[in-house]
Amino acid sequence: MTATIDIGGVKIPRTAALAPMAGVADRAYRLMCREYGAAMVTSEMVSAKGIVYSDRKTAELCTVTPEERPMAVQLFGSEPEFMAKAVDIVLRYEPDIIDINMGCPVPKVVGTGAGSALMKDIPLAAMVCEAAVKAAGSIPVTVKIRSGWSKDENVAPQMSKALENAGAAAVAVHGRSRDQFYSGESDNSVIKAVKDAVSIPVIGNGDVTDFASCERMYRETGCDLVMIGRGSYGRPFIFEEIAAGMAGDDYTPPTLEEKMEIMLRHIRLMLTLSEKPEELAMHEARKHAAWYMNGYYGSAKFRGRCYQLSSYAEAEELAGEFIALQNSRAEL
């Protein structure tokens, strides 16, 4: 029987959760990952200020469907009063958890004082968290952070303790600093230091690409849950592999033909859920198609062709050509 962890009353299987990823983890992506066993999913990050000012995308970003639960809605912002107002609005969508992004490294977020910029001002970060907790009532609030602003300092334990004192129900830690972005290696010792510093659940994140690396993160950090971001690109079935590994069961990865069918099913789901015309919706599907083809002979050329796709029929044809190429190589 799979173990579970409890985040503010929300029971989550202790396997692996899908990380929030702006521009990637839309509803279709989340549904695919849940289908393959993701323990929890989180929305793409939403601007607290944007919600308060009635951003037209609020409903699209914050809606939680039954198939996605347990699901967190992630907010970013650096002003406590706006965070509280945004949480109040988000509660209408009945998320299981509200998450605050204090780890995003991108300039447009950091430039507003939000994301990982808050790691330079721990008292303000705690105030933002406390405002969210008060507004959220019985809904648990979690926070996602990094090791710190620069690689030379690990403020994650200190920050996590301040967030715990502010009422956070859990903290997710990416083992890189802001200035590393996604380069170099994620440092599991950062996550362990946070686990040693707080009594609330700790979620580990960074460089988990298979069951072996997931199991290593659990072992080396003592974290309560593992969260996967880029390791799931073109591989929603990674959650199935990890769930099997955690249960001690054998796992057979999908064949190339099965991967291509998963890719096409993913694209069909994106097209079904999109309100845009097929050609425009395919623009958003291109990168996903390319990710499914990583690691194979001639994949660079095919990934380039993925970025020219403008219809589902073209994706279907390309998948067939890709399978034929790999099969021809196998016969040599």
Image (spheres, rainbow, N blue to C red):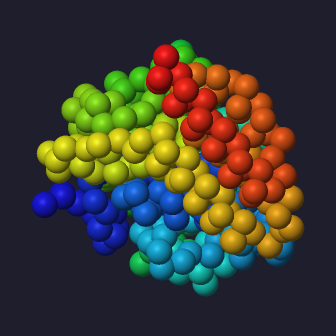
Q: Is residue 10 left or right of residue 281?
A: left
Please say if 18 is above or below 67: above
Q: Position of residue 195 (x, y in %)?
A: 30, 39
Total residue callouts: 0
Question: Quick one: quadrant of the N terminus?
Answer: bottom left
Q: Residue at 77% of width from left, 31% of height from top?
A: 304
**Residue sitting nearer the eye, 311 or 123:** 311
247 sits left or right of 175 in the view:
left
The answer to whether residue 215 is visible is yes
| Residue 129 percent location from the top left of the image | 54, 58
Q: Quadrant of residue 35?
A: bottom left
The residue located at (65%, 64%) in the rendering is 268
Give x and y (percent) for residue 109: 75, 44
**Where does the image place residue 331, in percent across and percent down from the top left?**
47, 23
Splitting the image into 4 quarters, where does residue 252 fall?
top left
Please tell me which residue is depicted at 71% across the width and 33% down the height of the picture.
303
- Residue sitting at the far front: 331
Residue at image point 63% right, 44% down? 320
Q: Residue furthest bottom?
A: 92
Would residue 115 be visible to someone looking at this image?
A: no
Q: Give the vertical position of 313 relative to 73 (above or below).
A: above
Q: Image quadrant of residue 111?
A: top right
Q: Nearer the viewer, residue 262 or 174?
A: 262
Nearer to us in this view, 46 or 28: 28
Say above or below: 190 vs 52: above
